[in-house]
Amino acid sequence: MITIKIGGSVVENLHPSTISDIKKVADQEGVILVHGGGKEVTKTCELLGKEPRFVVSPSGIKSRYTDKETAEIFTMVMSGKINKAIVQMLQKHGINAVGLSGIDGQIFLAERKEKLVIVNEKGRKQIIDGGYTGKVTKVNSELLKMLLDKGYTPVVSPIAMSKEFDMLNIDGDRAAANVAGAIQSDKILFLTNVDGLLMNDRLVEKMTNAEAKEIRPKVGFGMEKKILAATEALDMGVKEALIGNGQRENPISAAISHTKCTVISK
C-alpha cells in the first residue's frame, strides 16, 4: 500500500507516464492519492477579488491564512475543480477513481486553531485569530480501506471537518502523512517539482528520520513542510517516506526504486 501526495505543480503539468505509473501501482498494491493545488486557490482568490494572505510561524513554516471567505474558496477549488479534474483524468486511463473531500464521511476530523503565533513583517512574534485552519486529529481509515478493498482509488482533497462542523483548510502534505499513518501504508511518496531535498545544489538521496528532523529547520519553505510530513508519517508507523519529481517520466516507479529522489527511513 502506498499513499501519494500530488502537489499542485504536478497536477498542472502531469507527465503522461505518471497516470500509467499510478495504474500499475494501484493494480499491484493499492494507492490513495491526496492532492494539493494552492496556486489554483490563489489564482481563484485573485479573480474573485479576495487577496490571498500568507503567514510564517516562529519555526519558519509558511502557510495560507484562511478566513471564512477563503475557506469557502479553498473548498470550492480543491474539492471541486482540482479533485474532479484528477478523477476525470484517472478514469480516462482506466483507473476507477473516487473523488472525495476530507469532510465526506469525515475522512479528516481536525481541531480548529483558535490562535496562531506568527512572525510579522518586523520579525516579531504576534498572536492572531486562528481563522479556519485545522490540525488533523483523526482519519476515517475504515472508509478508505473499504474503497481500496473494492478496487477503487480514493482521491482526497485536504479539507477537514471540525467538531463544530466547520470546514477547515489543512495542509496537504501533513494530511497525506495522517492518511498513510492511519491505514499503515508501507510507503508515502510526495510528488513535487524537484527531485527531492536539495542542499547546496546537491540531491540528498538518503536520510534517517532523526537526520530529517535535525535538518528540517535549515531547508526552504516548500520543502520544509514535506520533511515535516515525512517525519510525522514515519513516527506513525510508515516504513519509508519518499520525495520525488512528479514531472519526470515514471516518477512513482522511479521513487519506489530509489532513483533520483530523497528517501527517508527509520
Image (cartoon, rainbow, N blue to C red):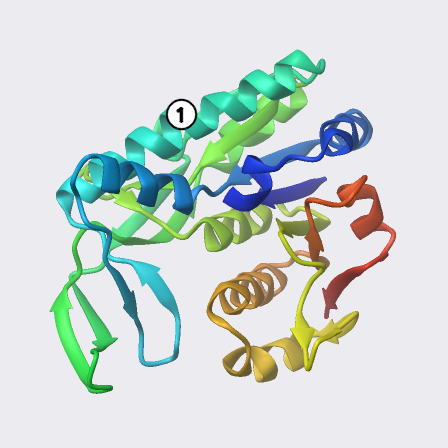
What quarter of the picture does the N terminus occupy?
top right
261, 100: nearer the viewer: 261
Where is residue 91, by image quadrant? top right
For residue 243, what is the image quadrant? bottom right
What element does badge 1 sit on?
A: helix
Q: Position of residue 236 (x, y in %)?
A: 57, 60
Q: Is residue 236 visible?
A: yes
**Residue type (three-letter) at the residue carrying disc 1:** Lys
Q: Residue at x 57, y 67 (%)?
A: 227
Q: Is residue 68 above or below residue 99?
A: below
Give the residue at x 46% y 27%: 83
User: Which residue position is annotated with label 1?
Assistant: 81
- Residue 124, placed above or below residue 241: below
Q: On screen, 136 above or below 59?
A: above
> In the visual, does 254 lie left or right of 186?
right
User: Residue 153's spot in the image, x, y percent?
Assistant: 62, 25
Quadrant showing the C terminus: bottom right
Mark 1 surroundings within 10 Å by alpha-carbon count, few (fewer than 14), some (14 through 19), many (20 or more): some
**Image height of 47 relative to 236, above or below:** above
Q: Residue at x 62, y 52 (%)?
A: 193
